[in-house]
Amino acid sequence: MINPTNRQLQQARKVGNFIADGWRYVLPGAWYRMRVPRIMASLTDAELEEAHRRAAYLNRMEQCRPGEEWIRVADFRFPWRARHRHSGYFFPLNHVLRHFCRDYRFSYVFGDLTEEPSVPSFVKCRPVSGGHSNAVVMKLNAVRHFRFINDPVPWESKSPRIVSRNYVYWPKRVRLLERWFGHQACDLGQINAVPDHGHPEWLVPRMSLAEQLKFKFISCIEGNDVATNLKWVMSSNSLAVMPVPEYETWFMEGTLRPGEHYVEVKPDYSDLLERMEYYLERPTLAREILDNAHEYVDRFRNPRMELAVSLLVAEKYFRLSGQMENFL
């Protein structure tokens, strides 16, 4: 039997999602708007409280008025002929917004956002910060970023080393290889041939997810924005190892606590081996981090809750922009 690669599995998920998105896209807007009360009424009191708490974190915009450049919900159409269609961004956002009035207006920014937008906008990611933010986070590009797994290998049975397989374009990832490539406690490497950063030996074969799960520690290093693998690593029985995150998505990386949800290392990775040894000598603490990580991940596994939180994020956006009253 031939096992599909990570890339093949991701492609299959993309195709399946695209078909489902296409069906949702042709449904009438009235059907979406009619089901909002039913969706929210299905939540328990505890779930509704949690949904409001998450929505308040994801949408921290201030009151404003819609700008002339904002687009109407009714005019938000899939760009079939565009070169970069961003289907992984468009369809999830469109799916949520169709639950609201066709005449409401909004702004959005697709792609990897590393700076604050000038006006309140729906985005996939934003810099971690406190206080108000124009970056209103939605669950976008979820096919790539939201993959959870069931890891059959217990932490105690894994190799006491750290693994990393990444596209290495960004300084954070370069620093990790500069410091620890070739060390016996590390299986590190880059999977992009260009640029080689003057180190052609860094180029190594790709490694399947199952192969990476053989290690007790997996690096989760941010690239252009968040570390894409953080979600599946935290759902596994391997410890996520990373500096304090600088960017966050729907996963609310800014709420993760070092030593509770992941193993923190310094930005220059100088203490990497020290931190690994610390948890190797304290397996009970390692197990506690894994349990906490699994509990954190479980908050994002319920499709009904995910939709409810999305609706509350959008409701707050339209309410604070003066376009609607509370609908809940």
Image (spheres, rainbow, N blue to C red):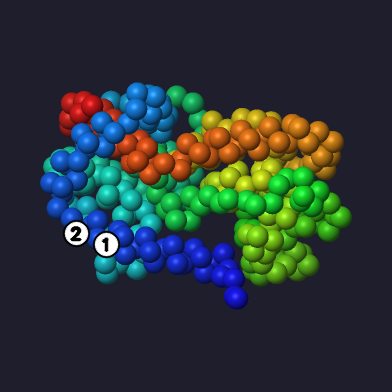
Residue drawn at point x = 28 percent, y = 30 percent: 316
Please tell me which residue lies in front, 73 or 287: 287
Q: CA distance from mark 1 to mark 2?
A: 7 Å
Residue, disc 2? 26
Amino acid on which the number 1 mark rests in the picture: Gly
Q: Is residue 247 above or below residue 3?
A: above
**Left or right of 66, for residue 177:** right
Q: Is residue 155 left or right of residue 220?
A: right
Q: Nearer the viewer, residue 290 or 321?
A: 290
Q: Quadrant of the C terminus?
A: top left
Position of residue 161 in the picture relative to residue 102 (left or right): right
Residue shown at 54% from the left, 67% from the top: 7
Q: Circle 2 sits in a helix, a strand or a loop, which is it?
A: helix
Which residue is depicted at the point 74% across and 31% down? 285
Cβ atoms under marks 1 and 2 closer than 8 Å = yes
Q: Which numbered tag is attached to residue 52?
A: none
Q: Which residue is mark 1?
A: 22
232 or 144, nearer to the observer: 232
- What residue type is disc 2 on? Val
- Residue occupying the point 49% across, 26% down: 130
Quadrant housing the N terminus: bottom right
Residue 219 picture location, percent across and down: 68, 48
- Count of numbered circles in the view: 2
Question: Residue 217's x, y, as percent?
Answer: 73, 47
Q: On screen, 36 above or below 167?
A: above
Q: Quadrant of residue 255?
A: top right
